[in-house]
Image (cartoon, grey):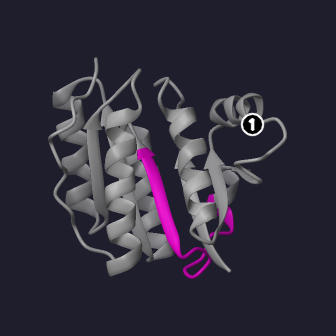
């Protein structure tokens, strides 16, 4: 079975947790065994949001996950990137795993969004899906759907984000 890992950092953005559950459900439907590596606070939100583990069955602490991580452990990396620390985690996991990778870059501030996107682009060759998003997960969900379908079907490459959906602030 193919394995995917989803990285979740600080859950400051209200759209991160529902989007993580959505991504896990979508990947499971695509035949992936999904693990979510997260900060303790992001894990607590997942535990409350999915108490019977319908969507996320495998959870681990992002720090302890790094200790034993090796190339080949996962077939797909998806990172939620909304802070500088999330960029660092994504880049670190990307270089260790050396696998198909998708950075979901989001923020309410366009300048920070551009900065995070540029940081990922300069440090990796991962596919990037980005959107102005904070309360409303829809713009990023649309990009996730489009980009994930392309990534799974065609291998890793850099996609230009679509700019036709409006974000929120």
Horizontal and vertical percent position of residue 108: 29, 24
Is there any visible trace of residue 159 in the rendered image? yes
Q: Residue at x 29, y 51 (%)?
A: 129
Q: Nearer the viewer, residue 105 or 51?
A: 51
Quadrant assignment, res 103: bottom left
Quadrant assignment, res 8: top right
Label 1 secondary element: loop
The crowd level at tag 1 (other Cα within 10 Å; few <14, some 14-19, many 20+) is some
Quadrant assignment, res 31: bottom right
Q: Residue at x 41, y 73 (%)?
A: 152
In magenta segment, residue 12: no
Q: Residue at x 40, y 66 (%)?
A: 101
Q: Which residues are magenta?
A: 66-80
In magenta segment, residue 69: yes
Compared to residue 105, the image places residue 152 above or below, namely: below
Horizontal and vertical percent position of residue 18: 56, 34
Residue beneath label 1, please? 50
Q: How many marks?
A: 1
Is there any visible trace of residue 62 in the rendered image? no
Position of the C terminus by quadrant = top left
Horizontal and vertical percent position of residue 46: 69, 35
Q: Residue at x 72, y 51 (%)?
A: 60
Horizontal and vertical percent position of residue 47: 76, 34
Name of the residue lying farthest toward the right: 52
Compared to residue 137, the image places residue 6 above or below, namely: below
Q: Nearer the viewer, residue 159 or 66?
A: 159
């Amino acid at each position: 079975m193919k394995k995917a890992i989803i990285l979740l950092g600080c859950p400051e953005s209200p759209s991160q947790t529902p989007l993580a559950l959505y991504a896990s459900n979508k990947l499971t439907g695509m035949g992936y065994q999904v693990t979510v590596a997260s900060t303790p606070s992001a894990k607590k939100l997942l535990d409350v949001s999915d108490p019977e583990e319908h969507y996320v069955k495998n959870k681990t602490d992002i720090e302890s996950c790094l200790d034993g991580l090796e190339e080949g452990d996962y077939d797909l990396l998806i990172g939620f990137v909304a802070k500088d620390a999330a960029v660092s985690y994504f880049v670190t996991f990307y270089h260790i795993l050396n696998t198909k990778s998708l950075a979901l870059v989001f923020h309410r501030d366009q300048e920070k969004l551009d900065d995070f996107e540029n940081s990922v682009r300069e440090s990796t060759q991962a596919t990037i899906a980005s959107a102005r998003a904070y309360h409303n997960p829809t713009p990023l969900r649309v990009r996730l759907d489009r980009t994930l379908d392309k990534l799974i079907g065609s291998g890793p490459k850099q996609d230009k984000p679509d700019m036709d959906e409006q974000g929120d602030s």
